[in-house]
Amino acid sequence: MTDDTPADSKLTRSKQRWAQEGRFLTGRVARPDTERLPPGQHLTMDWPVLDLGLHPSISRDRWTLQVFGAVEHPQIWDWAAFNALPQSRMVSDIHCVTTWSRYDNQWDGVPVHALLDLVQPKPGADHILLHSHDGYTTNLALSDFAAPDVILAHSWSGAPLTEAHGAPLRLVVPHLYFWKSPKWLSRIEVRTADRQGYWETRGYHNRGDPWAEERYSDD
């Protein structure tokens, strides 16, 4: 994410201030095997739209997804080739760092483990940096990226994703706060060293486990 990306919205400034203030922290730790709603969260039936204020419009005819870096077989898929990959349907919850959660979201797309089987991360690869068409970036440990329920989703509730929610493709990482599930995904960089993304450099936690309430950095 570069500083010239249009990210100076009122919400973005507020979220940076919340990180500095430690807003919404309860100090409680929960267990995902016994508690469905993480600490400090509340349920909503809506799906709020939160981003950096830019909604890129990406034609499927021109869309590509690139996987590069520390992999044996770098790949660039167009829309047809990506949709020819193994497809799955998964149901998972959303937990946003701004304290809302939404249960039972149905996603259709390509499970990440199928993609990793094709590109084959090299020995020593242990992190991922995700790049989006709006300039957003976020980082993940390879182990989080490769979790069984992580999916590269093109559809939600049986219909293609809308532009506001990340069409044509977004990542969904259900076990972490939703800023780790970038919209408008364009590139997946496999790395041998961690590199923080947009929110991580602005005071958000490097991992983002909702049940441990890892909203903000300890630094």
Image (spheres, rainbow, N blue to C red):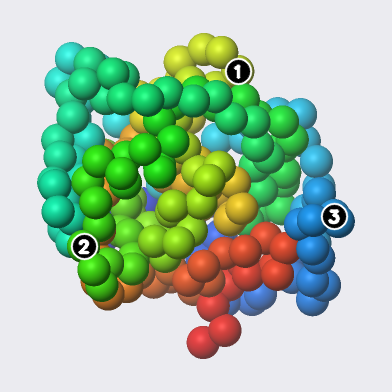
Front residue (pair 135, 123):
123
**Residue 84 figure quarter:** top left
Front residue (pair 157, 121):
121
| Residue 155 image position (x, y, % from top left) | 48, 21
Q: In the image, which disc is placed on residue 157?
A: 1
**Residue 160 figure quarter:** top left
| Residue 192 image position (x, y, % from top left) | 24, 71
Q: Residue at x 40, y 42 (%)?
A: 112
Q: Residue at x 22, y 16 (%)?
A: 80
Q: Amino acid at mark 3?
A: Glu
Q: Residue at x 31, y 25 (%)?
A: 85
First in sequence: mark 2 or mark 3?
A: 3
Confirm whether residue 59 shows in the render.
no
Judge from the rendering whether residue 209 lies leftward or rightward of residue 70; answer left or right. Answer: right
First in sequence: mark 2 or mark 1?
A: 2
Label 2: which residue? Answer: 122
Label 3: which residue? Answer: 35
Q: Residue at x 18, y 29 (%)?
A: 77
Vertical arrangement, residue 30 with respect to residue 41, above or below: below
